[in-house]
Amino acid sequence: MNNTASSNANTAPSPGLLSDKVAFITGAGRGIGAAAARLFAREGARVLLAARTEEQLKDVTGQIRDAGGIADYVVCDLADAASVRAAVDRTVELYGRLDVAFNNGAAIQQPGPMDQLPETDFDYIYAVNLKGPWLSMVAEIAAIRATAGTGAIVNNSSVGSLMGNPELPAYGAMKRAVNSLTESAAVTYGPEGIRVNAIAPGNTRTEMIRTWEASSPGLSERLVAHTPMRRSADPDEIAQAAAWLLSDRASFVTGTILRVDGGARA
């Protein structure tokens, strides 16, 4: 056997994790969503970014295109059904189909006990963090059915949904409900070849954590102290888990809430 030929065969580049996929990502203007958009494009996907802030979307889309990726964006309000449907429809209009979706967008709440949370804040957190993923899944499933036929969806939950959450009670409650929606959707649409999973990130270096830190000084240190790996995650590390779940390499995984938390809930 020619050793050189054998060596070249063994080192040939493998196709990207999401090669030839069309991906839709909410909350894609910053943090985990932006990291996911850049990663998915590097892994071969054509990506549509959705979020409320056009300036952020333009910036991330430009980064992806400059790196040789294929991406576009649409301004989207997750609390508005028509806006969500239009964003998903735009994906199909641009790229011809929808294969995978990462429902990442979320609103934050100020840390504190639930009796101190204004009703209007609760209603908004519900509209974005629970109703938003539901609206997104409904639109995404319809688009996958009508185009690719089979596909995968990942919802971004939180380790804060897996136990009592006195600091972020409404946020934790909505994310726990997202877990339930994820599992129900997995059971409902599995027979059609549509997989639905969620990731539950732990302490991650995002604007949300920085905002909470400003309201509750020392929060980041406390979170790190309760993480066996003794550090916070980079947003790309969370995006990597979502990418794998959306890929064909996770072809028999559905209905899973995957902790990506450095062991914080072990």
Image: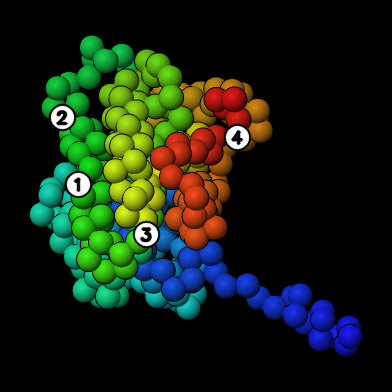
Describe residue 10's horizontal placement relative to residue 135 as left or right.
Answer: right
Which one is earlier in the sequence, the residue at label 3 or at label 1?
1
Q: Could you say whether the residue bearing mark 2 is in a helix, strand or loop?
A: helix
| Residue 172 x/y as whole percent | 35, 26
Q: Is residue 177 positioned above or below 29 on the image?
A: above
- The residue at which mark 2 appears reads as 123
- The residue at which mark 4 appears reads as 262
Q: Could you say whether the residue bearing mark 1 is in a helix, strand or loop?
A: helix
Q: In which quarter of the image is the N terminus?
A: bottom right
Q: Is residue 73 visible?
A: no
Q: How crowded is mark 4: few (under 14 residues within 10 Å), some or many (20 or more)?
A: many
Distance from disc 3 to disc 4, alpha carbons, whole Å, reads 28 Å
Which one is earlier in the sequence, the residue at label 2 or at label 4?
2
| Residue 189 x/y as whole percent | 30, 48
- The residue at which mark 1 appears reads as 135
| Residue 69 x/y as whole percent | 45, 75
- The residue at which mark 3 appears reads as 151
Q: Is residue 12 visible?
A: yes
Identity, as a three-letter code, of the amino acid under mark 3: Gly
Question: Can you tell which mark lies on residue 240?
Answer: none
Q: Is residue 46 positioned above or below 223 on the image?
A: below
Distance from disc 3 to disc 1, alpha carbons, whole Å, reads 17 Å
Which one is earlier in the sequence, the residue at label 3 or at label 4?
3
Distance from disc 1 to disc 4, alpha carbons, whole Å, reads 30 Å
Q: 24 or 123: nearer the eye?
A: 24
Q: Which of the two marks, 3 or 4, is nearer to us in this view?
A: 3
Identity, as a three-letter code, of the amino acid under mark 4: Gly
Distance from disc 2 to disc 3, alpha carbons, whole Å, reads 31 Å
Q: Do the residues labelled 3 and 4 touch (CB within 8 Å)?
A: no
